[in-house]
Image (spheres, helix red, strand yellow):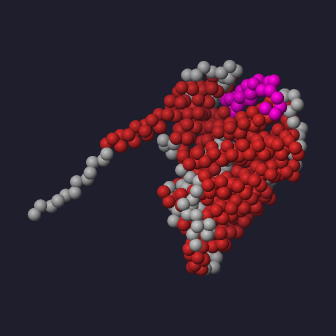
């Protein structure tokens, strides 16, 4: 009697080779786009090195959209390429001619500059907060409470998340701290209760919907309140210094109120229609959540400590931003969690998602900052002013708002976007006869929050939700485009007429 050995079936060669060919094409696409732009004649008035920098930057963005490699690898590659070729891409001839200028040192300093950005560290802190919620089971407890009372329908959970962000927004001038550090660690515990896992087809059961609702809510509330986003305050300082116009908290709130209320009410339902969860109604899960809460029993020592620490962080973010940077407050809480045993050092070193997002966002911050330092953004503003000559005030307002909004694709930071582009836009608008500058300014500044939805790097909390494992790259870019267009259309069709009538 002979033994029969199973022979493995040969892999489908055509399918495998087709997959490899597609992957190679995706790998080559960012390089092809960058090289093609490098050979495009340099626009008049723009230094060659600034145009060449822009070519590499666009190549990086293409890589981030199609993601043939992880986003952190794409970003790090872009930074390394520019730093190695900095004498042709990053620094002006005048800088290079200065005997005191050290090319190698300055190139490295620029390459790692993003790692010193406070928003990057705040994002990292949000991941550590989430780790604390997970390890102590406090996040699970809060999630179970939400599910017990609102979990029968996925839609009501979406509205609960939106309401939580809305209540915190007026008092938290950092949407990363508010949404990434407070909302996300809680809702990250919700999907597993429904059998919805990250980086898995089951993500669409409910996790994908909840994560998208959360990041969308954060963007809307960031536009709704002056005090809900740090760059809002920076924007008002720029407006006052350039135009001498003062905007109060109440003026800002009234200007965005009708649009804000409409978006808050409609957004969870829009997400429910456009990105529907597979689980819509579940009568058993709330009952199960009640039983699980009984099993958890009373709050443990570590849960109580975590609750105290989170409240302390929230208090510092709301009331003590003048004395302690929000990112430093987050680091302080992380240290306290380590000293009290709420977290162990291994919990931090083994958190791959946190480190991946940290590297990815830090490189993007450096790359976006380079657009300003090379003079590309200044040139863009100057050319825009020339093109706007002779255009009516109403048309100019719409065109400038569209440009300001869509150019956010080039920025990994709302602060950088505000610093680089808002002065140029204000200067251009001030040269147009008959322009209602009060209305124009309000349109510009209230767009800063909602524009963050368009990319996975558009605002502070974006990388956190993108890195959650529930929002695949293709879904995020597609939804970002759809919701970004909805927000922009609403701003033009509702916000603009309302502001024109009120101011």
Residue 205 appears left or right of 25: right
Q: In which quarter of the image is residue 298?
A: bottom right
Number of numbered discs overlaid on the protein picture: 0
Where residue 211 appears, as percent x and y from the top left, is 61, 57
Q: In which quarter of the image is residue 136?
A: bottom right
Which secondary structure is most common in the magenta stretch? helix
Q: In this view, does 165 lie above or below 152?
A: above
Where residue 163 appears, as percent x and y from the top left, is 72, 62
Span of residues in magenta:
372-395
Taking the spot 61% from the left edge, 69% from the top edge, the residue there is 152
Taking the spot 61% from the left edge, 29% from the top edge, the residue there is 53
Q: Does the magenta stretch include residue 56?
A: no
Residue 20 appears left or right of 397: left
Q: Nearer the viewer, residue 169 or 345?
A: 169
Question: Looking at the rendering, in which quadrant would you find the N terminus?
Answer: bottom left
Taking the spot 68% from the left edge, 36% from the top edge, the residue there is 407
Where residue 96 appears, as percent x and y from the top left, is 64, 24
Q: Nearer the viewer, residue 87 or 414?
A: 414
Q: Which of 21 and 423 is in front in this view?
A: 21
Taking the spot 76% from the left edge, 61% from the top edge, the residue there is 167
Question: Looking at the rendering, in which quadrant would you find the C terminus?
Answer: top right
Where residue 186 appears, as percent x and y from the top left, is 63, 64
| Residue 82 in sight | no
Q: In this view, does 315 lie above or below 32?
A: below
Q: Does the magenta stretch include residue 386?
A: yes
């Amino acid at each position: 009697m002979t033994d029969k050995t199973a022979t493995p079936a040969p892999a489908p060669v055509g399918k495998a080779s087709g997959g490899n060919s597609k992957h190679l094409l995706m790998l080559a696409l960012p390089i092809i786009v960058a090289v093609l732009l490098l050979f495009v004649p340099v626009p008049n008035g723009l230094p060659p090195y600034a145009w060449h920098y822009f070519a590499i930057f666009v190549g990086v963005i293409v890589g981030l959209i199609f993601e043939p490699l992880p986003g952190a690898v794409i970003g790090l590659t872009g930074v390394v390429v520019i730093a190695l070729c900095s004498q042709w891409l990053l620094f002006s001839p005048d800088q290079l001619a200065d005997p005191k200028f050290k090319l190698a040192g300055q190139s490295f300093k620029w390459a790692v500059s993003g790692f010193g950005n406070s928003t990057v560290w705040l994002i990292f802190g949000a991941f550590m907060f989430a780790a604390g919620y997970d390890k102590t089971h406090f996040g699970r407890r809060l999630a179970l409470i939400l599910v017990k009372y609102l979990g029968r329908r996925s839609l009501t959970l979406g509205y609960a998340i939106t309401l939580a962000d809305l209540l915190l927004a007026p008092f938290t001038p950092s949407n990363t701290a508010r949404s990434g550090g407070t909302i996300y660690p809680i809702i990250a515990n919700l999907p597993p209760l429904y059998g919805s896992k990250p980086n898995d087809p089951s993500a669409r059961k409910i996790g994908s919907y909840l994560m998208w609702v959360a990041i969308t809510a954060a963007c809307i509330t960031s536009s709704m309140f002056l005090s809900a986003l740090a760059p809002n305050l920076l924007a008002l300082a720029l407006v006052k210094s350039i135009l001498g116009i003062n905007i109060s908290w109440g003026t800002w709130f009234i200007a965005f109120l009708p649009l804000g209320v409409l978006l808050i009410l409609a957004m969870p339902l829009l997400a429910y229609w456009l990105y529907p969860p597979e689980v819509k109604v579940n009568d058993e899960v709330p009952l199960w959540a009640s039983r699980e809460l009984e099993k958890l029993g009373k709050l443990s020592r570590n849960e109580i400590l975590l609750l105290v620490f989170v409240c302390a962080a929230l208090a510092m973010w709301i009331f003590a931003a003048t004395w302690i940077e929000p990112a430093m407050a987050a680091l302080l809480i992380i240290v306290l969690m380590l000293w009290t045993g709420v977290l162990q050092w291994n919990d931090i070193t083994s958190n791959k998602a946190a480190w991946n997002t940290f590297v990815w966002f830090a490189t993007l911050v450096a790359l976006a900052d380079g657009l300003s330092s090379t003079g590309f953004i200044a040139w863009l503003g100057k050319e825009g002013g020339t093109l706007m000559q002779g255009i009516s005030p109403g048309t100019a307002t719409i065109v400038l708002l569209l440009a300001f909004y869509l150019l956010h694709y080039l920025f990994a930071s709302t602060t950088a976007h505000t610093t680089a582009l808002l002065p140029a836009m204000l200067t251009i608008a001030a040269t147009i006869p008959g322009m209602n500058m009060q209305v124009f300014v309000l349109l510009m500044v209230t767009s800063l929050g909602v524009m963050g939805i368009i990319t996975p790097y558009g605002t502070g909390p974006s990388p956190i939700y993108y890195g959650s494992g529930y929002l695949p790259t293709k879904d995020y870019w597609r939804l970002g485009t759809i919701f970004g267009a909805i927000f922009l259309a609403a701003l033009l069709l509702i916000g603009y007429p309302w502001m024109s009538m009120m101011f």
